[in-house]
Image: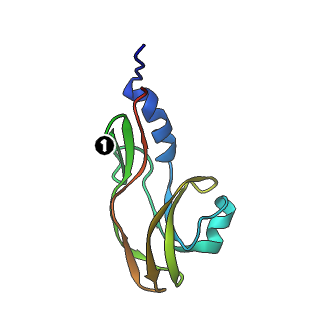
């Protein structure tokens, strides 16, 4: 028996993840929202919500749906360290965390975040 979900069902989870209003480059994976401050190297305010400029929800690469964070340029670096993760938070909850290519960051410089997929939910099989 085949299984099928309407895109709006899959988008429900993605719509929670795109509530992140701040994106951080961090030197480690924080355990929770409170742990972000200890490892944050750079951060930028994000506009939450699909279609508002910082996120898009679209068809997945192979099936289903995906959430993409659009590129952010010239983000001021607050602390020196090596960025290994990118984190999204809504101010009270760590909504998502992903690894990134390690990059040495120096305080007072800037860093660019390329566009990347935060998550992808495949169609059921």
Q: Would residue 33 be found to the left or right of residue 27 on screen?
A: right
Numbered disc 1: secondary structure: loop
Picture residue at 46% right of the left edge, 40% below the top: 14
Q: Position of residue 78 (x, y in %)?
A: 51, 80
Above or below residue 65? Residue 93 is: below
Residue 82 at x, y percent in the picture: 50, 79
Q: In which quarter of the image is residue 11?
A: top left
Count every numbered label the image shows and give the total. 1
| The N terminus - image quarter | top left
Place residue 111 in its image quadrant: bottom left
Q: Could you tell whether 49 is left or right of 61 in the image?
A: right
Residue that lies at the very extreme toward the top in this rendered image: 1
Image quarter for residue 37?
bottom right
Along the viewing direction, whichever of 67 and 4 lies nearer the viewer? 4
- The percent coordinates of residue 55 (x first, y second) are 37, 50
Residue 86 placement, left or right of 65:
right
Q: Residue drawn at (67%, 61%), measured in percent from left and top?
A: 31
Within 10 Å of the Cα at label 1, are there few (<14), some (14-19), or many (20+) other Cα atoms?
A: few
Kindly identify the residue that appears in the image at 42 percent across and 23 percent down: 5
Report the residue marked by disc 1.
Answer: 61
Residue for point 50% across, 71% down = 84
Q: Is residue 102 depicted above or below 50 in this figure?
A: below
Q: Which of 76 and 87 is in front in this view?
A: 87
Would you place residue 1 above or below residue 51 in this image? above
């Amino acid at each position: 028996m085949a299984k099928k979900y309407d895109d709006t069902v899959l988008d429900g989870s993605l719509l929670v993840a795109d509530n992140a209003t701040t994106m951080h480059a961090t030197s480690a994976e924080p355990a929770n929202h409170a742990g972000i401050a200890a490892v944050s190297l750079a951060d930028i305010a994000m506009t939450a919500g699909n279609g508002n400029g910082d996120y898009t929800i679209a068809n997945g690469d192979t099936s289903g749906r995906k959430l993409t964070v659009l590129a952010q340029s010239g983000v001021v670096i607050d602390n020196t360290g090596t960025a290994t993760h990118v984190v999204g938070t809504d101010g009270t909850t760590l909504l998502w965390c992903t690894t990134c290519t390690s990059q040495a960051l120096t305080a007072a410089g800037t860093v660019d975040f390329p566009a990347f997929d935060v998550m992808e939910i495949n169609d059921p099989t």
